[in-house]
Amino acid sequence: AEITTCIIKLLEICQDVLVDPSQLFSVKLGSSSHRAHASLLHLLAGNGNTHAMEALISRFHLDFNTLSPEKGTPLAYACEVCPASRLEQTVDCLVESGANVSSPDSDPLARLLSRSIPDPILLKVANKLVALYKATDRSFEPLSPLLLKPNAISIAGYKFILSLKPNLSIVDSESELNVVEAAVATLFPPFVIYLLESFRSRSISVAPLLTDKLWKTLDEKYKEANGQSGDEDYRRNVNERVSEISRILLQHGAPTSSFPFLDTIKPIIRKFLPF
């Protein structure tokens, strides 16, 4: 309450100096790398200070789509850093005040899905944002591109995207990986499990995506992971994950013609091989 009062007093004092006192909300504040180049409005949204925002809304005309090159819009910034306990209220406050969910330069939903926060909160806020996207943009594409970069999102976020029935036939223009290869490249079995289950539940054949390239991708990521650490426990963990992913792929009919060339991972998954 004291912070809110101080902010309001500051703006009231500045009314005689600034043509538009709300200009203060675009001033870049902060010196740490986390908050550098964020406006006052960004900081309020990032902290979940809805009391301050609501008090200011009643006194000044604020642009809730102020864009920061580093932080995006206040809504996007809130979705990225606002404490989970205050996230829903903060998003509601921003949206009701005119925040645009579909700014081409700032994607609040993608930022939200990258967070590791309690699933109920993430899903509740994500569903609200999706509803707003669909209301303002009938051509809304349900985040299919994020399936090509699963390491950038949380497992709850990944499952949420799959629940929207996204396009599963897309291919990354840079890496040329399809969604299955991208999931395999994470060396994280749950991504592979949830993705293949999505194919099955939607009666979409995954066979065209189960190519020899899957094993080459797995082999490359296995070598890369093992080269990052000499820790024995870490190596054992990587081996277990590669083994589990291999079992899942073979269970779904992945080809085995390239196995003779994969001397690195072949010993790990020998127990699953048909020869």
Image (spheres, rainbow, N blue to C red):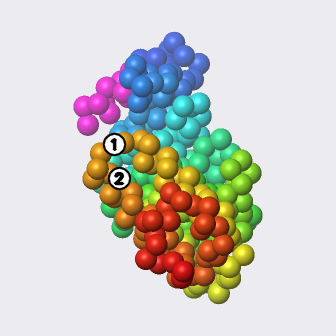
The structure residue drawn at horizontal position 62% and vertical position 61%, both measured from the top left corner, is: 261
Is 190 positioned to the left or the right of 129 in the image? left
Magenta stretch contains residue 266: no
Residue tagged by mark 2? 235
Image quarter in which the C terminus is found: bottom right
Q: CA distance from mark 1 to mark 2?
A: 7 Å
Q: Are marks 1 and 2 in contact (CB under 8 Å)?
A: yes
Q: Establish if 4 lies above or below 23.
A: below
Point 46% across, 70% down: residue: 269
Q: Position of residue 30 (x, y in %)?
A: 40, 22
Q: Is residue 234 above or below residue 71?
A: below
Q: Which residue is mark 1?
A: 230
Q: Nearer the viewer, residue 108 or 192?
A: 192
x then y, percent, for residue 45: 42, 41
Circle 2 Cα neighbour tier, 10 Å, few/some/many (<14 / 14–19 / ≥20):
some
Q: Nearer the viewer, residue 31 or 215?
A: 215
Comes first in the chain, label 1 or label 2:
1
Q: Of the residues shown, which amino acid type is indicated by label 1?
A: Gly
The amino acid pointed to by label 2 is Arg
